[in-house]
Image: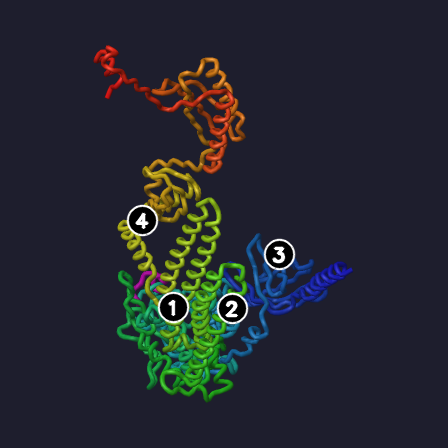
């Protein structure tokens, strides 16, 4: 039942949202639309299943009918018409469409605020009309506002009726090019004039060119006159030539490195700081005086200070700032007793040209300048925006609730002085508590482990944890309070470096303890691969942690870590060359782990020594000889020499020589050999595929019978026991068959001289 209820609720929500979307699929309203080479404001009204409306410029109209989310119909303009098809988006805020054999026609719904732009246009004086046109065109061209473009169109008065909408757009674009290439003060435009016509001369900051902007009054409102396109084109060509360029594109490319471009890059970059504008804004200010380790902290803060100053200085009109890239001397945008806002040429990196940027002195004075003008409201016409940095967000919150804490006794404000001791106390207490907690948790969770490991882990991991938590908490508090972006940026960097060091210390210690634990477990197994693997992995992790820590600390403190990495590489080569024997032994340890020629406890023979393997390390192998001496052989020697592994034999060879008396009869000898082989094969450990028994040779005192075979035994203790049993059985066999064992004997006969022995016989009987 529960599942059925959930399914029903899901279906109900789905169909409800779908029905709601259908209800809100309304085409009525204002739309900013554009196509390949133009744009228009579209006003639509939907009634039942039909849509009708008009669009300007062009005085066109639209008629259509609705099919779900699709509107099909026709457009009508200048005695021509064509088909259209528009598809409404899911949220109802935009549409995608086509007209005239596949030409696109798209649009977005205009909000009430944007729709009211036309009503907010003020042009009751020539100056107001020019100001409104420049403001709106700047917003339309540099910020892509179609609403502003439509509102600006209401300020234009065309000389002679445009032949079509394309001619109207061309004339408007050429007039704007003349305005944008010029440098002028709107305040210098005429405010009050007698009559119904006025003019205002504009021109570029460099060169000797002037163009007269004509304004005309109709009723109580003033409009900017738009001449015919040929006249405007001729004026644009003249201004390009006057500035010493062949084409308009060359002129715009040169003007991209100018005081105006620096101001525009900075302000537009700060407005879009979190959506890719950060790099653009910072490239427009001279931060060469900042230490690299403080750049990430102080650069955004200084940019925020400068933005707050400019927003309070007044509304910035691009055309009031010089766009002359070859200007002699710096451009002073704002003067104040506490400091000025200056844009000057700053030498670029080696091989790159100079760039116009806000001067380093401007950035240094920005905090003091802001302190003097912080109570001045932001200029009219500037949209409120969130501060760039956390410092300003926190500061504005404190200013709204506790303005008295903004007093500045020294280099910091009062609230910042209060944060410092509180954060230090909390960091110490928090670090101590968490360090003790880690020690307690480890002591309890490792009760089954060895006591030494438990106590060592609790103590050794608790200390770096306490330091890490304390320093990390300090960094978080300083960052949250904006202290990292003030003169305490160096302290923040130091705390971050301490936190990174503590983290490396913690990881290094944890790796060492974990490696020691697995090393103890590996010693309980017969294989040495675990020993080497644990040693290699532990050593590699330690080296990696130390290298990562060095790079992290270098990055935090501003040291170019590329140089650190290169230094580590060169140092590593030198170290490897100096310790090539050690490196060879390490490689030998890896080879032993890969080949596995023996295990712990195996009896091996190497370098002329026979010993039992006790431990295989990264550098050497420890063995115990039969006389209980400790033998240490470097791994590189073990891998270069032959190794006889007696401990890895599948079976052991047994070889006995049995001496029988010469007096033993032949038939008894043959019977003894037959029974001897049977006795060997009767042994539990005997290899029944072997067992070679027979007379071997004539000895000095006996006939030698050889027994040669194998026991299916690998361990030495079992081999000794099996051989003992075999020899015992042989003794019993000889007694049962009345076969006597021979032992070395010598018969000496003493003869007197009377016996007549010759000298040769005496020598034969007594060779000595």
Q: Quadrant of the C terminus?
A: top left
The spot of residue 634 in percent (x, y) is 33, 45
Taking the spot 48% from the left edge, 81% from the top edge, the residue there is 396
* Mark-to-mark CA distance, 4 and 2: 40 Å
* Mark-to-mark CA distance, 4 and 1: 33 Å
Lower sequence index among marks 4 and 2: 2
Q: Dot 4: what SS?
A: helix
The residue that mark 3 highlights is: 83
Q: Quadrant of the N terminus?
A: bottom right
Q: Dot 2: what SS?
A: helix
Lower sequence index among marks 4 and 3: 3
Say the numbered circle drawn on residue 440. Answer: 2
Region rendered in magenta: 242-251
The spot of residue 418 in percent (x, y) is 44, 84
The residue that mark 4 highlights is: 582
Is 760 situated above or below 569? above
Label 2–label 3 contact, CB within 8 A: no
Q: Dot 1: what SS?
A: helix
């Amino acid at each position: 039942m529960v599942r059925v209820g959930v399914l029903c609720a899901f279906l109900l929500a789905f169909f409800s949202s779908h029905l709601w979307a259908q209800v809100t699929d309304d085409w009525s309203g204002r739309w900013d639309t554009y196509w390949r080479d133009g744009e228009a404001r579209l006003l639509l009204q939907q009634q039942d299943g039909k849509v009708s409306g008009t669009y300007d410029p062009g005085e066109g109209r639209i008629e259509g009918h609705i099919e779900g989310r699709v509107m099909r119909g026709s457009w009508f303009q200048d005695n021509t018409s064509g088909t259209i098809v528009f598809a409404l988006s899911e949220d109802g805020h935009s549409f995608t469409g086509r007209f005239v054999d596949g030409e696109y026609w798209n649009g977005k719904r205009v909000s009430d605020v944007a729709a009211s732009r036309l009503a907010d246009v003020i042009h009751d004086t020539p100056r107001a009309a020019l100001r409104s046109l420049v403001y709106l065109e700047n917003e339309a061209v540099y910020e892509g506002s179609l609403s502003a473009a439509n509102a600006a169109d209401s300020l234009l008065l065309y000389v002679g009726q445009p032949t079509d909408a394309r001619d109207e757009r061309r004339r408007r674009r050429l007039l704007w090019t003349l305005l944008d290439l010029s440098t002028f003060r709107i305040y210098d435009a005429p405010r009050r004039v007698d009559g119904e016509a006025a003019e205002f001369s504009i021109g570029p900051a460099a060169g000797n060119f002037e163009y007269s902007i004509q304004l005309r009054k109709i009723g109580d409102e003033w409009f900017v006159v738009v001449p015919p396109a040929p006249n405007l084109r001729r004026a644009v060509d003249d201004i390009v030539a006057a500035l010493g360029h062949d084409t308009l594109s060359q002129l715009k490319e040169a003007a991209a490195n100018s005081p105006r471009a620096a101001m525009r890059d900075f302000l537009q970059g700060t407005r879009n700081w979190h959506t890719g504008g950060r790099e653009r804004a910072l490239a427009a200010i001279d931060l060469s005086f900042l230490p690299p380790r403080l750049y990430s902290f102080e650069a955004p803060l200084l940019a925020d200070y400068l933005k707050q100053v400019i927003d309070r200085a007044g509304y910035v009109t691009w055309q009031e700032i010089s766009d002359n890239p070859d200007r002699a001397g710096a451009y002073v945008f704002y003067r104040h007793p506490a400091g000025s806002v200056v844009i000057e040429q700053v030498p670029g990196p080696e091989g790159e040209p100079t760039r116009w940027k806000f001067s380093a002195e401007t950035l240094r004075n920005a905090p003091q300048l802001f302190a003097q003008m912080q109570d001045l409201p932001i200029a009219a016409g500037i949209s409120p925006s969130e501060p760039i940095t956390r410092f300003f967000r926190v500061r504005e919150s404190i200013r709204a609730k506790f303005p008295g804490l903004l007093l500045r006794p020294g280099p910091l404000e009062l609230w910042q002085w209060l944060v410092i001791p509180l954060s230090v106390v909390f960091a110490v207490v928090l670090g101590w508590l968490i360090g003790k907690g880690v020690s307690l948790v480890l002591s309890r969770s490792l009760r089954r482990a060895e006591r030494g490991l438990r106590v060592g882990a609790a103590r050794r991991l608790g200390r770096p944890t306490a330091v890490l938590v304390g320093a990390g908490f300090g960094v978080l508090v300083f960052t949250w309070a904006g202290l990292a972006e003030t003169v305490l940026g160096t302290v923040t960097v130091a705390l971050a470096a301490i936190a990174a060091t503590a983290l490396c210390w913690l990881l290094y210690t944890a790796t060492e303890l974990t490696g020691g634990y697995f090393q103890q477990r590996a010693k309980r197994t017969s294989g040495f691969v675990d020993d080497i693997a644990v040693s290699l992995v532990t050593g590699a992790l330690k080296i990696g942690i130390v290298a990562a820590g060095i790079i992290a600390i270098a990055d935090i403190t501003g040291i170019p870590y590329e140089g650190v990495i290169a230094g580590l590489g060169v140092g590593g080569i030198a170290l490897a060359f100096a310790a090539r024997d050690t490196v060879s032994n390490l490689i030998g340890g890896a080879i032993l782990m890969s080949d596995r020629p023996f295990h712990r406890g195996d009896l091996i023979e190497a370098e002329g020594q026979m010993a039992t393997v006790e431990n295989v390390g990264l550098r050497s192998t420890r063995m115990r000889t039969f006389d209980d001496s400790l033998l240490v052989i470097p791994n590189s020697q073990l891998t270069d020499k032959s190794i006889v592994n007696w401990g890895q034999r599948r079976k052991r060879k047994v070889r006995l020589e049995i001496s029988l008396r010469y007096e033993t009869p032949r038939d008894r000898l043959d019977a003894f050999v037959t029974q001897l082989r049977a006795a060997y094969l009767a042994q539990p450990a005997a290899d029944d595929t072997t067992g070679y028994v027979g007379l071997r040779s004539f000895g000095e005192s006996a006939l030698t019978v050889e027994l040669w075979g194998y026991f299916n035994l690998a361990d030495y203790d079992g081999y000794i026991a099996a051989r003992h049993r075999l020899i015992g059985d042989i003794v019993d066999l000889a007694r049962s068959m009345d076969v006597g064992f021979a032992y070395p004997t010598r018969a000496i006969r003493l003869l007197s001289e009377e016996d007549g022995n010759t000298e040769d016989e005496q020598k034969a009987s007594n060779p000595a």
